[in-house]
Amino acid sequence: MRLTFVGKDPESNPTGSPTVYRTDRGSWVVQGWVVTDSHALALMNIPEGEACVEIPDRMIPFFKEDRAVDQ
């Protein structure tokens, strides 16, 4: 899988997470905060081999494909 850096959250310090990447497989990879709220996880019924991360609303603009840049 080839990743193309799209953007890091400029308001998240010191690590710069969340981060958004575009793949060469027509998908997105999001680095974010691990969801640990047991009630929320139970409501999602996440299958084996999958996970979820939380990102803030301010990261949504990074999902526009035309913003992707190689890093």
Image (tube, helix red, strand yellow):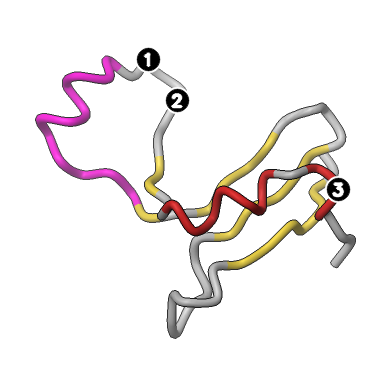
Residue interval drawn in magenta? 34-45
Residue 9 is situated, as x and y percent measured from the top left of the image, at 54, 68
Residue sitting nearer the eye, 15 or 1: 15
Q: Quadrant of the N terminus?
A: top right
* Label 1 to label 2: alpha-carbon separation: 6 Å
Helix, strand or loop at mark 1: loop
Residue 61 is situated, as x and y percent measured from the top left of the image, at 63, 52
Residue type, mark 2 in image: Glu
For label 2, the residue is: 50
Q: Residue at x 44, y 75 (%)?
A: 12
Q: Residues within 10 Å of mark 1 (few under 14, many from 20)?
A: few
Instruction: Give above or below for 2 relative to 39.
Output: below
For label 3, the residue is: 66
Q: Residues within 10 Å of mark 2 (few under 14, many from 20)?
A: few
Residue type, mark 3 in image: Asp
Residue sitting nearer the eye, 10 or 53: 10
Name the front one of labels 2 and 3.
3
Q: Is residue 20 part of the magenta span, yes or no?
A: no
Is residue 41 found left or right of 55 in the rendered image? left
Residue 47 is situated, as x and y percent measured from the top left of the image, at 37, 14
* Label 2 to label 3: alpha-carbon separation: 27 Å
Q: Residue at x 49, y 58 (%)?
A: 58
Helix, strand or loop at mark 3: helix
Residue sitting nearer the eye, 66 or 36: 66
Q: Residue at x 20, y 44 (%)?
A: 36
